[in-house]
Amino acid sequence: SNWGGGEIVQVLLSHSKNIDIQSRNGNSPLIRATIEENTEIIEALLAAGADVTIENKNRKTALILAVEEGNQEIVKTLIEAGAPVNLKDKVGDTPLVKAVKASKPEIVKTLINGDANVDIQDKYGQTAMMIAAEQGNLDIVQILIANSADVDIQDEYGQTAMMIAAEQGNLDI
């Protein structure tokens, strides 16, 4: 393409005193590039030392947004750059929970390989395992079990993943 966005970013990076400046909604250049799924610009920003821990107004980091976009490559790039894998957004979801909700087994594996805690509970006490069980997502349930997820954790109603699966009629799980 003849769009010079990548080159313009490079020029601006070399003159910027604050590459992590945030817009009114809290988006940094790294967050914007992640939303646009622009790998070239993400890599340029990371190389220049962009802060991977910045959260926007919805408490979403670039990593959470990459998971929401379903972009495996960007998820991997951000984890390798040290993005926090267990931070919760405004609704209390970690990147792992977002990946489970979106039924993205490859991203689930990438996050776990990047040290995501499989047993973190949301504000209702639910774990990634419970959400996968509720969705009837056997692939993800098996990935979580293979990575030592605790199947006996109870949510705020005292329910376990097995109870939730049984309630949904998901006998495979």
Image: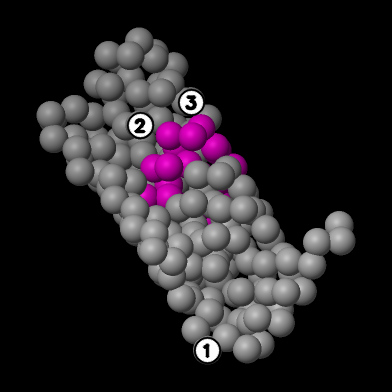
**Can residue 120 be seen from the camera position used here?**
no
Q: Secondary structure at mark 3?
A: helix
User: Mark 3 or mark 2, which is nearer the start of the sequence?
Assistant: 2
**Can residue 50 be seen from the camera position used here?**
yes
Q: Secondary structure at mark 1?
A: loop
Please state which amino acid type lies under the numbered disc 1. Answer: Lys
Please state which amino acid type lies under the numbered disc 3. Answer: Leu
Q: Which residue is mark 1?
A: 17
User: Mark 1 or mark 2, which is nearer the start of the sequence?
Assistant: 1
Which quadrant does the C terminus fall into? top left
Q: Residue at x 43, y 47 (%)?
A: 96
* Closest to the observer, 69 or 139: 69
User: Mark 1 or mark 3, which is nearer the start of the sequence?
Assistant: 1
Does the magenta portion include 104? yes
Q: Which residue is mark 2?
A: 131
Q: Which residue is mark 3?
A: 138
Whole-angstrom CA distance, mark 2 to mark 1, is 43 Å
* Closest to the observer, 20 or 66: 20
Residue 124: x and y in percent read 19, 38
Q: Which residues are magenta?
A: 94-113
Q: Are marks 2 and 3 in contact (CB under 8 Å)?
A: no
